[in-house]
Image (cartoon, rainbow, N blue to C red):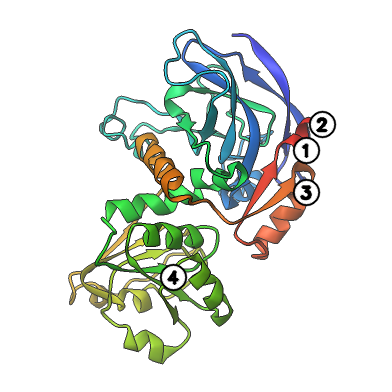
Amino acid sequence: MNTVQIKAFGTETSTEDLKQLFINRREVTAKDVEIDILFCGVCHSDLHTARNEWGGTIYPNVPGHEIIGRITKVGSNVSKFRVGDLAGVGCMVDSCRECESCKEGLEQYCENGNTLTYNSPEKHLNQQTFGGYSERVVVDEDFVLHIPETLDLAATAPLLCAGITTWSPLKHWNVGPDMKVGIVGIGGLGHMGVKFAKAMGAHVVVITTSASKADDAKRLGADEIILSTDKEQMKNNTGTLHFILDCVSAQHDINAYLRLLKRDGSLAIVGAPEHPLPVAAFSLIPGRKSFAGSTIGGIKETQEMLDFCGQHNIVSDIELIPMQDINRAYERLLNGDVKYRFVIDMESLKN
């Protein structure tokens, strides 16, 4: 298969900074589109993978799975896109398409293993997939998303991971009017959870350890704030929430939040703490409560989210950076020094 060499930013070992590299992309096949990348969001997963903190990183590694760009080429059998269209690529670029999950439009739960946007086997070439910290990307049209032209494109990029990660559980648990919904933490994930839950019509309660975040939580759409370090506030809100979306990746007492649920309430965790979170049986049994997890959404669901965002003008709160600042951004990400997502202006790589 023919390939083309392009500029990218990545790392060749777990201990090196990211730097400019050259990588090979396949030429478009019959079902592919080529996207000129305009913006790429920075996800904590990028940092974990680049530094091999989860194990299994293949080097050289080029992260990035929050991709926004314009289509520059289409294959002969492409029917969903045209040259010039805005397009997005999220965390997946393929799946088996044959298992039960894939047939239900839940490619994120592909039982044979989906193909991630980076650090997965590339089905057409004898190499790994490379992500969006690059000039261009070539993706099967079935895993490409239409982007509403009305949205701020840079601020749209994080919707493709942070957005769909919070949207999917809110939709699965049927969040809507007449529901009181808790969002634990308002970082990169949580701030999107607040925006979505509010736009879905719920009464939104932000639960945070930091009193200083109260004003910002209200700006994002929160109706109430609970300071989780205040035992009296937590006690007074026992049994008041229909659903809780837990967006915290640090260690925390999950039982304290389960106590806030009403009977038959559910808590879904999308944060990923390093160590197990002990759950007491009697945090669940008396109120028939559920403790669950959720990941990103499938392609159909992601498109529905993007359409919803277009209708309600919902995007992420971002800080735009040049590609050359990515290593500094990673260090700031580790220190929680971002409000709320970094996005790379990819023009800085092409010049």
Q: Earlier in the sequence, mark 1 or mark 4?
A: 4
Q: Amino acid at mark 4?
A: Ala
**Contact, mark 4 vs mark 2 (Cβ under 8 Å):** no
Q: Are marks 1 and 2 in contact (CB under 8 Å)?
A: yes
Task: Read off the residue under disc 1.
Answer: 348
Task: Indicate the quadrant where residue 14 lies.
Answer: top right
Determine whether label 3 and label 2 are within 8 Å by CB: no
**Quadrant of image for the C terminus:** top right
| Residue located 27% across and 56% down the image | 173
Q: Are marks 4 and 3 in contact (CB under 8 Å)?
A: no
Which label's residue is closer to the chain start, 3 or 2? 3
Is 46 placed left or right of 123 in the picture? right
For image coordinates 41% across by 56% down, the residue present is 196
Amino acid type, callout 3:
Asp
Residue under numbered circle 3: 325
Inter-mark Cα distance, 1 to 4: 36 Å
